[in-house]
């Protein structure tokens, strides 16, 4: 009873045991592992892509017109574009903007959505009605159109783009969290906490929210892919990040006029996008199997 | 100690797309009084309003009419602070030990939470709370090695013991037991019941014991009330109700009761 020194060790083993089991279940599915590896690569290039690029001067906007449209070779594995820039360097450096923007969108969307959904679901009544009708209203406006409107009002740019997409992104989280909070609110352990005398804040933060984290994390991971795509789509239509800052959507947009003769200028940014989206979706599916087994199809 | 006077709870009709549904009378004019130190049993079938009554006592729900007094104080008129203090005095053990423990909290956090909430009342610091949690686990037959485990690592009987430890944590005087053994295996039921009896003697507790199992009621309770469709149809000493039932419902219920051997 006084053996306090051993108790934290007990806690650690119990928790690490749970982790080991989750990891085992995750490893059961090869696709999840593939997804995790792909996501790891994407995150690696997000952090170091700009530094590792073989032609950093091209990333910064330098041109080399003598070497325009070189086909993929040893010196330029992905070839060069209309300005003679190394496509590999641009794609590597472009990871940073695309993934960081996608992540920022998902994060902001989650924060706003969880706050709104938790307040709506926990309080119910007219607060719930008002907040959910508001988020329904947001859902009726197509994200791209809203983003274009925001870009038109605030001007194009990295931060405005993220804000614009986040604005159309949070209602999904609000709905998810609201539903989860409403079902968790009826759990017996929540009644138990209230009977003990726990304050509403305590009930929400200690008993309800920790129990709905899993579906939110799963949705974040699944949404990462779509967020990256949306960011690229905005870049593609020219209201996202401006050149010379490399970004996958912008790269694709510029090079589409050189298809099909100089296919490498478009194929490689597209492929990078494909792999990133695919990786995050596989990872999300894997995480769902581990964290939220009920939702498994 | 606890007086329930003419408590009625009507759930208003829900307005649906196709006109109004019927209102539900969950409790009608329920009057009971529970004395200090006794075990008071409440027997009724599913849907007879037993759980609704516990929710009124805990003030998780408000009666449509009627008064509930604890130690002479009308619970409806208490200030939020006074009500919070009162909640330390009345605790509950729920029927389903699988649902009534937060799966994300360790046993330590579950058992110390009431002490944390009522720290003004109990005046325990972090270290003392942990010590008391260990004592409580010991009291309900669990060990210090269980302190940092999570609910899913325990069996139903062990979980119910954790629930009992949590209920004991703020030092209550009245414990509502809402079918505490009906979700457990028969062999485990007896262990938990004996634990409850033992705890009552040691800690001088008053029990409000809800069950549909007449054998359990007879084993534990001093006095008993029968509830049917939200109305109390009979109440009295356990022995006299079981030996000479007055109402038709009580006779029916006792006739349907399988022969059980009750240790004296």
Image (spheres, coloured by chain):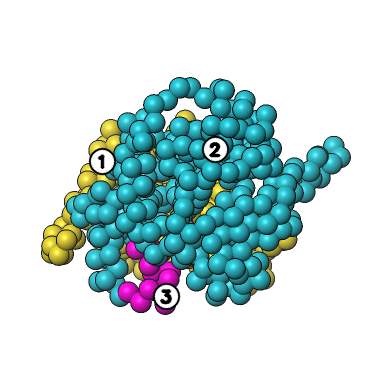
User: Can residue A94 be seen in the rendering of this structure?
Assistant: no
Q: Which residue is mark 2?
A: B240
Chain letter behind tag 2: B
Inspect the magenta stretch and tell me whether residue B117 lies in it.
yes
Q: Which of the pair A147/A173 is nearer the observer?
A: A173
Mark 1 and mark 3 in contact? Answer it, CB < 8 Å: no
The chain letter of the cyan chain reads: B
Q: Does the magenta portion include B189? A: no
Name the residue carrying label 3: B121
Establish whether labels 1 and 2 are both on one chain.
Answer: no
Main SS category, magenta section = helix
Precedes in sequence: disc 3 or disc 2: 3
Quarter of the image with the N terminus of chain A in it: bottom left
Q: Quadrant of residue A123?
A: bottom right
Q: In the rendered view, does B63 fall on the left or right side of B54? A: right
On the image, the x and y values in percent for residue B87 come to 50, 65
Q: State the image coordinates of residue A242 (x, y, percent, origin top left).
A: 50, 65
Give the foreground label among 1 and 2: 2
Q: CA distance from mark 1 to mark 3?
A: 41 Å
| Side of A87 relative to A136 (left or right) | left
Task: Give the residues in magenta.
Answer: B110-124
Q: Chain of mark 1?
A: A
Image point (56%, 36%), residue name? B241
The answer to whether A156 is drawn above or below residue A220 in the figure is below
Q: Nearer the viewer, mark 1 or mark 3?
A: 3
Mark 3 lies on a secondary structure that is helix
């Amino acid at each position: 009873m006084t053996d306090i020194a051993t108790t934290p060790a007990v806690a650690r083993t119990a928790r690490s045991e749970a982790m080991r089991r989750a990891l085992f279940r995750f490893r059961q599915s090869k696709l999840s592992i593939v997804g995790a590896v792909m996501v790891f690569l994407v995150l690696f290039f997000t952090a170091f892509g700009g530094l590792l690029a073989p032609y950093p001067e091209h990333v910064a906007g330098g041109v080399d017109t003598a070497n325009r449209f070189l086909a993929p070779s040893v010196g330029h594995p992905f070839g060069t574009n209309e300005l003679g820039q190394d496509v590999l360097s641009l794609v590597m450096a472009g990871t940073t903007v695309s993934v960081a923007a996608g992540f920022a969108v998902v994060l902001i969307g989650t924060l706003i959505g969880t706050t709104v959904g938790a307040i709506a679901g926990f309080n119910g009544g007219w607060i719930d009605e008002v907040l959910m009708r508001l988020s329904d209203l947001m859902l009726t406006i197509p994200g791209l159109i809203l983003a274009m409107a925001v870009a038109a009002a605030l001007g194009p740019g990295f931060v405005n783009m993220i804000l614009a997409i986040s604005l159309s992104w949070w209602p999904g989280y609000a709905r998810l969290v609201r539903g989860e909070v409403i079902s968790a609110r009826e759990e017996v352990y929540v009644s138990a906490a209230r009977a003990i005398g726990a304050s509403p804040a305590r009930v929400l933060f200690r008993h309800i929210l920790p129990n709905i984290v899993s579906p939110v994390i799963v949705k974040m991971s699944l949404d990462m892919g779509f967020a990256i795509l949306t960011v690229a789509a905005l870049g593609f239509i020219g209201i996202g990040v401006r050149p010379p800052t490399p970004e996958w959507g912008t790269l694709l947009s510029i090079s589409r006029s050189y298809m099909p003769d100089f296919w490498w200028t478009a194929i490689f940014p597209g492929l990078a996008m494909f792999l990133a989206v695919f990786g995050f979706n596989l990872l999300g599916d894997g995480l769902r199997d581990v964290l939220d087994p009920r939702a498994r199809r | 100690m606890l007086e329930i006077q003419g408590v009625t709870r009507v759930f208003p009709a829900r307005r649906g797309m196709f006109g109004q549904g019927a209102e539900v009378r969950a409790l009608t004019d329920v009057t009971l009084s529970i004395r200090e130190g006794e075990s008071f049993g409440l027997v009724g079938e599913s849907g007879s309003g037993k759980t609704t009554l516990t929710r009124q006592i805990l003030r998780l729900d408000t009666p449509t009419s009627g008064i509930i007094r604890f130690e002479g104080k009308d619970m409806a008129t208490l200030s939020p602070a006074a009500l919070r203090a009162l909640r330390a005095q009345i605790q509950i053990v729920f029927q389903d030990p699988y649902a009534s423990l937060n799966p994300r909290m360790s046993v330590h956090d579950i058992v110390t939470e009431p002490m944390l909430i009522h720290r003004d009342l109990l005046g325990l610091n972090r270290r003392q709370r942990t010590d008391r949690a260990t004592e409580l686990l010991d009291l309900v037959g669990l060990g210090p090695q269980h302190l940092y485990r999570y609910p899913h690592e325990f069996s139903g009987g062990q979980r119910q013991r954790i629930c009992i430890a949590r209920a004991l944590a703020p030092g209550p005087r009245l414990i509502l037991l809402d079918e505490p053994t009906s979700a457990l295996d028969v062999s485990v039921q007896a262990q938990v019941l004996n634990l409850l009896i033992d705890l009552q003697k040691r800690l001088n507790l008053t029990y409000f014991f809800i069950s549909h199992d007449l054998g359990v009621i007879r084993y534990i309770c001093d006095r008993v009330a029968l509830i049917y469709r939200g109305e109390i149809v009979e109440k009295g000493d356990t022995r006299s109700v079981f030996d000479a039932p007055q109402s038709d419902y009580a006779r029916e219920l006792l006739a349907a009761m399988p022969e059980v051997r009750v240790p004296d």
